[in-house]
Image (spheres, rainbow, N blue to C red):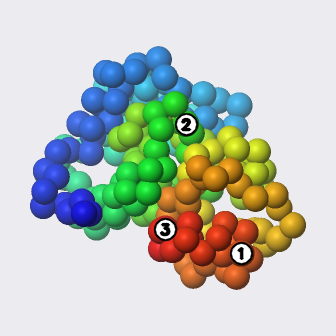
Amino acid sequence: MGFTASLHPLSLAGAVRASALRTPQRIAVVEGSRTLTYSDLMAAARYGRPHASPVVRWLTAEMAHDSGGENPRHRALLLRGLDNVVEHAAFDRDGASASSLPLDTELGAVAAMVSLLLGSTLHIVNPDELADGICAGCFQTCWLRCEENSWKGLPRPAAAFRLALCVGMPSSGLIQWLGPQRVAQAV
């Protein structure tokens, strides 16, 4: 059974705040050599502190919205992604997810927000780091563009790995690498 926007009137910003209150010192975002805890994100949003990180600027802007100001399309994409992650058991608060999607795109924003709603750690990575991290078992799930990598010759990902969301038609190399079932779950 899937989520629908009409059944979930809670504010996205409110849900991130709830994650921050549950685990304020948990690392929320890893961006290169920078790590930000949930309390760091909340402080930046609460006090409107300027921040050099584009991730923090985006997240604090998102968290500043109240439920009446949220984009309905963004919300629908978020609920679809959240439904997919939960339905396919691709979530563990102690696990990590990764995204190589730009945050200035709807799906990149959804990837970041789903991770924060669930209270896990999101790694913002480039495509090469994404493939390496998947193969090394660093990420439980990821968000990617299909054309990012040839996916050929890579070791198989861990059995627990799930593809959260895929932008574009999956390439034959991606389908062969992950297996058709894991790809079908994400599109």
Query: Is 90 rendered above or below residue 127?
Result: above
Closer to viewer: mark 1 or mark 2: 1
Residue at 83% x, 61% y is: 154
Q: Earlier in the sequence, mark 3 or mark 2?
A: 2
Q: Are marks 3 and 2 in contact (CB under 8 Å)?
A: no
Q: CA distance from mark 3 to mark 2?
A: 19 Å
Q: Are marks 1 and 2 in contact (CB under 8 Å)?
A: no
Pointer 3: residues within 10 angstroms few (<14), some, or many (20+)?
many
Q: CA distance from mark 1 to mark 2?
A: 25 Å
Spot occupied by residue 17 in the image (x, y as percentages of width and height) = 29, 30
As shown in the figure, which amino acid type bears the numbered disc 3? Ala
Q: Earlier in the sequence, mark 1 or mark 2?
A: 2
Disc 3: which residue: 186
As shown in the figure, which amino acid type bears the numbered disc 2? Gly
Pointer 1: residues within 10 angstroms few (<14), some, or many (20+)?
some
Residue at 19% x, 61% y is: 5
Spot occupied by residue 103 in the image (x, y as percentages of width and height) = 51, 54
Residue 176 tag number: 1
In the image, taking residue 77 as reference, residue 179 lies left or right, namely right
Dot 3 falls on a residue whose secondary structure is helix
Dot 2 falls on a residue whose secondary structure is loop
Q: CA distance from mark 1 to mark 3?
A: 15 Å
Disc 2: which residue: 95
Query: Is 117 rendered above or below residue 170?
Result: above
Q: Quadrant of the N terminus?
A: bottom left
Residue at the extreme front of the image, as rendered? 159
Is residue 117 shown to the viewer in this render? yes
